[in-house]
Image (cartoon, rainbow, N blue to C red):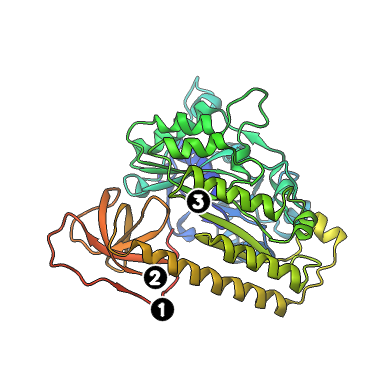
Amino acid sequence: MHDKKYHFWITGCQMNYADARRVATRLEKHGYRATPRAEDADVIVLETCTVRQQSEDKAYNKLHALRPLKEENPDKTIAVMGCVVGVRGNEHLSQSFPFVDVFMEPASDGTPLIAHLRQSDALLVEQKGTSERHLFQDGEVILPVHQRGRMVAAPVSIVYGCSHACTFCIIPQKRGRERSRPVGAIVAEARSLVEQGVKEVMLLGQIVDRYGYDVPDGPDLADLLHAVHEVQDLERIRFLTSHPNYLSDRILHAVRDLPRVMPQIEVPVQAGDDQVLQNMRRGYTASQYRDLVARIREIVPDAAVHCDIIVGFPGETDEQFQKTYDLLEELRLDKLHLARYSPRQGTVSERRMDDDVPEEEKRRRFDLLEALNERISEQKMRDYLGETVEVLVEGKRKKRWFGREPRGKLVFFEDERKLRGELLNVLVTHTGAWSMSGTPADTPASAPSLTRHVQSIPLSVI
């Protein structure tokens, strides 16, 4: 057999992309090659998300759409992994979708899929005398051919699962308890990615700053940042998502002291009222979060601070929401990731609290924070006007190169050279709330006029 192909459909967080890459590496080791079309694939893998009902419904709709492909070709293998399956599995999935061949839990290394392919005689590479364990090791990465030399930034999972259990979150039930990967495996993965053209890694964890907490006397995130920083030819390191209770000064000092660690801190507050925070089981007060932001800015003065917010949590009054608004207006954070509360089956909030904030009120609060976010971001971005920023060029969009500067701000510019993966200084000539644009500083040009876009367009580039 030869020329077997696999196809991935991925939704959800960056950790899902890192998990999918691990399974893709197993398939690549066995001779399979990636294809962008599910119709052309011998193996189709769905990497799913269930953090919101919309995400879960999206996965189910995709599965229904794949059923005709399986009926036309029964030899085609369909696998589902991720949070829709969960660590405990879901019997109802196999009943609802009997045409699915393999179900795999989140952070799976693909062993169930490989076992199925071996049983169906669909493995292409079998090395006599070489066990599957030696054929694949944690930290080894084989990117699909079309990504090698083209993937500039890549996610790397460093801690799986979560042991914190906020009342609104389904992740502990779906991804299981907290498990930190060995430093050596993480460094090996980063090194392998760099050898295939990656310039930046994003270290991921549901609570990334709890890395190593499950290992007695083990390394912490600061130690890991120092180790990854030593990977030759790696240009940049980022990490997310942090929790206010565990973002230690040691971690912040590592961000300050290590040139390749970017000054971008993702640390959710979720709400600005102490009673709501207590109901969420977050473990800190609004005042403690305010002090944390001050400490971040003291230790890493140029840091961009991003945070997550949930509006309309059960019982949240207008006065409590106003405290959230006032806190965010005071702190002037660089970016807000906003969500309207929706109950997830099996969480504490779903079982014990009434979803009593009307949808129209959730939308109103969401819109107010969205407008605040845009206004503050637009104002803060003006400070970049006329400045030169260092951009790691990720690719092209509508004939313009794009990339990010150290704080994670999106930068666009035009240039005829091939610049993917290069670090380039760009003089900023236009700014908006969500991006900026400019001129390469090493390109001769007449002095550009410095202007500001009052109406900015949100851009999402992955």
Residue wearing tag 2: 432
**Three-letter amino acid code at disc 3?**
Asp
Q: Position of residue 51 (x, y in %)?
A: 67, 58
Q: Which mark is residue 11?
A: none
Callout 2 touching callout 1 (CB < 8 Å): yes
Q: Nearer the viewer, residue 380 or 416?
A: 380
Most distant residue in the top direction: 129
**Circle 1 is placed at which residue position?**
455
For the residues carrying marks 3 and 2, which lies nearer the camera in this image? 2
Secondary structure of residue under mark 3: loop
Image quarter hosting the C terminus: bottom left
Does residue 179 lie above or below 411 as drawn?
A: above
Which residue lies at the image location 62% right of the left edge and 49% below the top edge? Answer: 291
User: How many discs appear?
Assistant: 3
**How busy is the neighbourhood of tag 1: few (under 14 within 10 Å), some, or many (20 plus)?**
few
Q: Nearer the viewer, mark 3 or mark 1?
A: 1
> x%, y% of residue 9?
53, 57
Per the image, the residue denoted by label 3 is 42
Q: Earlier in the sequence, mark 2 or mark 1?
A: 2
Q: Does the rendering let one see residue 398?
A: yes
Judged left or right of residue 460, residue 48 is right
Q: Going 49% across and 41% down the picture, which residue do you hit?
A: 27
